Amino acid sequence: MKSKLLSLFIIFISILGCKTERTDIITILDDLIKTEPSNSYYLYLRSEAHAHQENYSQSLIDIDQAIIIEPDSSHYHILKAEILSSIGKHDEAIKSFKNALRNEPNQSQYLYYLAKELFYIGQNDSAQKSIEKALNLSENPNLYALRAEIFLSQNKINEAIQDLNTALDISNNIDFLYTRASAYTTNEQYELALSDLNHILEKNKSHSDALFLRALIYLNQDNYETAHLDFNALLSSKLKNNEDVILGSALANLYLGNLEVANLKLNKLIRLKPEEAYFKYLRSMTQPVICDAYDDLSKSLDIDPENVKYLYHRSTLECSQSKSTVACINAGSVIKRTAWPPSAPQFWSNEPPIEREIPRSSFRPLCSDALKDISLAIELGLNSAHAFALRGNIRKKLDDYRGAMIDYLEATQIEPHNDEYFYQLARLQERFGENISALSSYTKAISIDNRNTSYLVSRGSLRLKIGHTQAACEDLRKASELGDTRAIRLISNQCN
């Protein structure tokens, strides 16, 4: 057997970072404990060695034996607390931390450990009391950073940032910088967040969390190209090749119009999570075949039947595409994409689709389905102008002009600066002989866009109809100056 002095030397050099295996240390300690079974320090060292090998049951046996021999050793109670925390026994860990503090009540590091454990189980008030007591003893930056995390969990973002500023004044720690960048992001202070993240990445280019957060900020700022580069860096280096990164990359490619790349990434996500409705919804925007887009939206709604966004977009396909789309949806024939999907930013703006003249007999059944979808979306809370405008458009195709007029009126009230909504409302009001209201709606549309010749010709035509010839001719002359041929014809007939 090795001499006791040599055995202890091997243990200590291993603790200092040399390459002696933990199993060798345990073997040496076994021999030492056989000769001195009441040596609490040997038991403590063996407990620590077992803990490093994640042999927590034996580790606990050893540290409990050490504590029986020397119950006043704070170090022993701290090790036991750390072991208990590692195996999820947080309430028992807290007791052990308190036992250590009973022996050394002014040890700020122990107060920090206790605060971390209390925060972990949601006892924020007690955690903050421990931190405040520790701060009276030591200006440890970790204490400010931990209190900042507590503030963040309580959505007290400004207080968190203040504590992180203090922590960073003491120590320019990358972890503190990242937490502050996260806080700035939550507070929508994106430029400050980017400054911190860039500083982190200058020091450590492979900091995957910083790179990912920066990519998300760029995505949120519509800086799709730069976001795309960051997501690519994460994927190509395999720093953070998880679902969130793949999704971010898919979104960046979608917004950039790289639909095939986005489609491939969404296919991968759907293979990983086939029951995730959102992935199928996004893939609908990338499909080169309209039927596949419709199928994705329908599958999304099978999983999440009350999602207003999915309902809205399926209704646009059901009633707002060409009659060949109807054949595709009904018969499953392959129709290549024409105007579907629109560019991503346009699609996500949720503007109502451009109205097309299609024989009503071709799509009436699908327009009825579209009406059900968009009505359910509105009923579930999609109280937006574009939703009412879309429903108004669908109702027109179903010859429900009165209902369409009500919907467009609602759209103008929600979004009073949209000239198109006022124009569509005016046409419907004119259809029902509500000429004074129609005149007012045309006028409102023109006040928003006074160079739209359709608006000017329509108001001029209505003014002719109700006998306001001079005002009508003024509208028509302005439209003709802007190059409208209809206005020129009307002037020649009505404004001599």
Image (cartoon, rainbow, N blue to C red):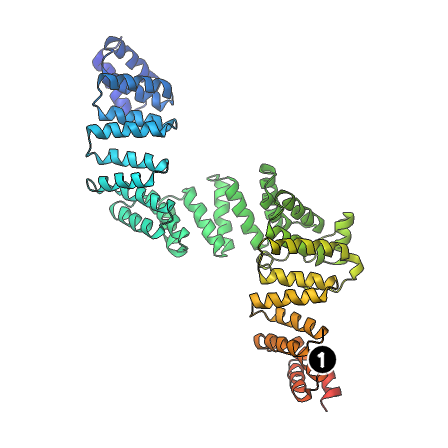
395 left or right, relative to 5: right
Nearest the viewer among 335 and 302 is 302
Pinpoint residue 136: horizontal percent, then vertical percent.
20, 42
The furthest residue to the right: 361
Nearest the viewer among 322 and 194 is 322
Could you tell me which quadrant the N terminus lies in? top left
Q: Residues within 10 Å of mark 1 (few under 14, many from 20)?
A: some
Q: Quadrant of residue 115?
A: top left
Pinpoint residue 489: horizontal percent, then vertical percent.
74, 83
For numbered disc 1, what is the local secondary structure? helix
Q: Is residue 150 visible?
A: yes
Q: Quadrant of residue 351?
A: bottom right
Q: What residue is drawn where x is 74% and y is 52%?
A: 335
Nearest the viewer among 349 and 119 is 119
Q: Is residue 84 above or below residue 248?
A: above
Pinpoint residue 76: horizontal percent, then vertical percent.
25, 23
Read off the residue under disc 1: 485
Nearest the viewer among 87 and 9 is 87
Q: Is residue 254 above or below residue 443?
A: above
Q: Is residue 386 above or below residue 494?
A: above
Q: Is residue 351 visible?
A: no
Pinpoint residue 26: horizontal percent, then vertical percent.
32, 16
217 left or right, relative to 470: left
The furthest residue to the bottom: 496
Q: Quadrant of residue 425?
A: bottom right
Looking at the rendered structure, the number of numbered marks drawn on it comes to: 1
Q: Amino acid at mark 1?
A: Thr
Could you tell me which quadrant the C terminus lies in? bottom right
